[in-house]
Image (cartoon, rainbow, N blue to C red):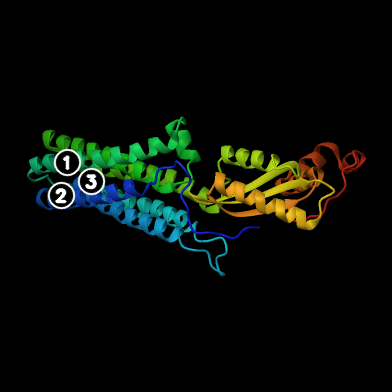
Amino acid sequence: MTGPERTRSPKGKPSSTPAVYAALVGDVLVGLTKVGAATLTGSTAMTSEAIHSFVDAGNEILLLYGIHRSGRHADVEHPLGYGRELYFWSFIVAVLVFSLGAGVAVFEGATHISHPAAIQHPTVNYVVLGLALVIEGWSWLVSFRQFNAAKGDLGIYEAFRRSKDPPSFMVLFENSAALLGILVAGVGTFAAVALNQPVLDGVASVIIGLILGATAILLARESKSLLIGEQADPHLSRSILAIAGAQPAVSRANGLLTVQLAPDQIVAALSLEFADDLRASQIEDQVIALEQKLRAAHPEIVVLFVKPQTDKAYHAQRRIRFGELVDVKRQAGPSQVRARGTSRPSRNRE
């Protein structure tokens, strides 16, 4: 086993931090202009948009805090480090988008629908929404370029599902929801004034809330999966196995378990079968050499476990751990499983 080290960025992967800072600056500027417009015009949709902008700004502060905390050194109480703090704060951000952003927007809209009031000075709304569209568009472009550089050849949705870096997709989704919200607020304001139906301003606010709610659900689902613990990218796993299998003293690289702790931190547990004539001290030397090679190729490996065992023992434990042995018993029955020579391996976890 190797000990945890301080966070290091994987080679060739762009940082999502600049996109978060760009979004924070944009949301603060847009939020201030929206507050002024909402005060002057009395528009409920504009009020919802102002709340949305300040909620997003608060979320970006939490993401930056999570990025900072996730890079702390490991200690005795947290031997694997603090990488998952980023995933924790990302989940909190998703909850806040739903509860504050979506909840308040729907509430404000419902209140305005029940008690409609005419929009005063709608031109102010149009000017502010135009400025907001420009600023949010710039912020969206920064986040999209960062996300696009990180996703490689993957499609946008597939990259979103497979991403291990919540700030990258969270900022992009929040900016996308903000642009949609601005368009909805503009249409709602125009319709409420042109048709002399103030209730449509409230309807626009409810639609903005629904957009935020759908965005929050997507973000919460992905953040929860990362917080619980996802495996590392399959390409990285295959690379680790290839490097381990190329070691001269390794007879077979049986398999690998990985857990993503942070965008640039993973734990890897290798099962290797060594040559039978090696002594314990020789195996230790081989493990040290392997660790050096893996760290050079993949600096995001902060903890490495190596378990010497046969291929048969490794797959027997996998069947128990992941339920495959249970499926075999259901299909064949206990007597048939024993007839195949499948012994009952120890229930010690890998």
The local secondary structure at tag 3 comes to helix
Asked if residue 240 lies left or right of residue 175, the reply is right
The local secondary structure at tag 1 comes to helix
Asked if residue 316 lies left or right of residue 292, the reply is right
Residue shown at the point (26%, 39%) measured from the top left? 179
Q: Nearer the viewer, residue 185 or 262?
A: 262
Q: Residues within 10 Å of mark 3 (few under 14, many from 20)?
A: many
On screen, 180 above or below 6?
Answer: above
Q: Position of residue 49 (x, y in %)?
A: 23, 47
- Identify residue type, mark 1: Leu
- The residue singled out by tag 2 in the image is 33
Q: Position of residue 170 (x, y in %)?
A: 38, 46
Of marks 3 and 1, the one in the foreground: 1
Q: Nearer the viewer, residue 13 or 294?
A: 294
Question: What mark, if any, has residue 129 been given in the picture?
Answer: 1
Asked if residue 333 lies left or right of residue 211, the reply is right
Q: Residues within 10 Å of mark 1 (few under 14, many from 20)?
A: many
Q: Position of residue 22 (x, y in %)?
A: 27, 47
